Image (spheres, grey):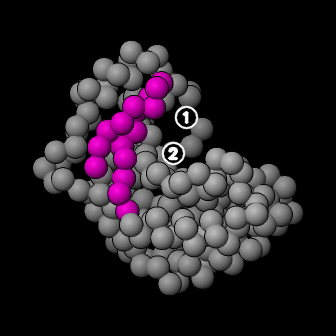
Amino acid sequence: MMPTWSNRRTCDIAMHLRCSSCSYTRGTEPTEDSRHGQVVEVSTATNDPRPLVVTLLLDSPAQERFEAQRAELFPRGRTAVGAHVTLFHALPGPLRRDVEDELARLTADTPPFPVGVTEVFPLGRGVAYRLVAPAAELVHRRLADRWRPHLTRQDAQPFRPHVTVQNKVEPDVANVLRQGCRVP
């Protein structure tokens, strides 16, 4: 089955800031009723040296849609995390307190914002939806400026928001899916 979007050209996705690492996270996932509130999730370990991953949190309908596509399209056992939009892939673990504090300030000052789904694009061995979200770009720029000396080469790249729905497959399999996916 080829995934498609509704008749809308854009999908309004309320996004929230979340900080997590590879360890246990706490917090409340948004529900249909609470998706417009701000949620910050952080690891409870304050001395964990592992890198921090900072993502934007999708509203429940979008999260469910992307999760369903990933469950169908990823090879079994090849997904380590759920659907997500990554802001930063690897902030240094020792910055945890600053990351938590800044995300708390930022979520208090930034209401949820709409996101447009503009196209399906290839990843070589997978497929993703490209997103357009000027508010997310501003958030990324603000945080990148704050942590610039600590950014990895990957995190210092321009922000290109997307959600990967298929990865780790043969390129010809990914190409067939990409050709069948469309954003009306």
Q: Are marks 1 and 2 in contact (CB under 8 Å)?
A: yes
Tag 1 secondary structure = loop
Of the 4 image quadrants, the one containing the N terminus is: top left
Q: Position of residue 8 (x, y in %)?
A: 16, 54
Q: Answer whether residue 34 is visible to the viewer in this image.
A: no
- Residue 184 in the figure: left or right of residue 62: left
The quarter of the picture where residue 20 lies is bottom right
- The residue pinned by badge 1 equals 79
Is residue 132 one of those drawn in magenta? yes
Is 52 situated above or below 109? above
Q: Position of residue 126 (x, y in %)?
A: 44, 29
The disc at residue 142 is none
Is 75 situated above or below 184? above
- Residue at point 70%, 67% (across, down): 147
Magenta segment: 118-133
- The residue pinned by badge 2 equals 82
Is 80 situated above or below 16? above
Residue type indicated by callout 2? Gly
- Residue at point 31%, 29% (across, down): 178
Is residue 37 one of those drawn in magenta? no
Q: Position of residue 54 (x, y in %)?
A: 61, 59
Residue type indicated by callout 1? Thr
- Residue at point 37%, 62% (across, down): 133
- Residue at point 64%, 54% (across, down): 156
The front one of 134 and 61 is 134
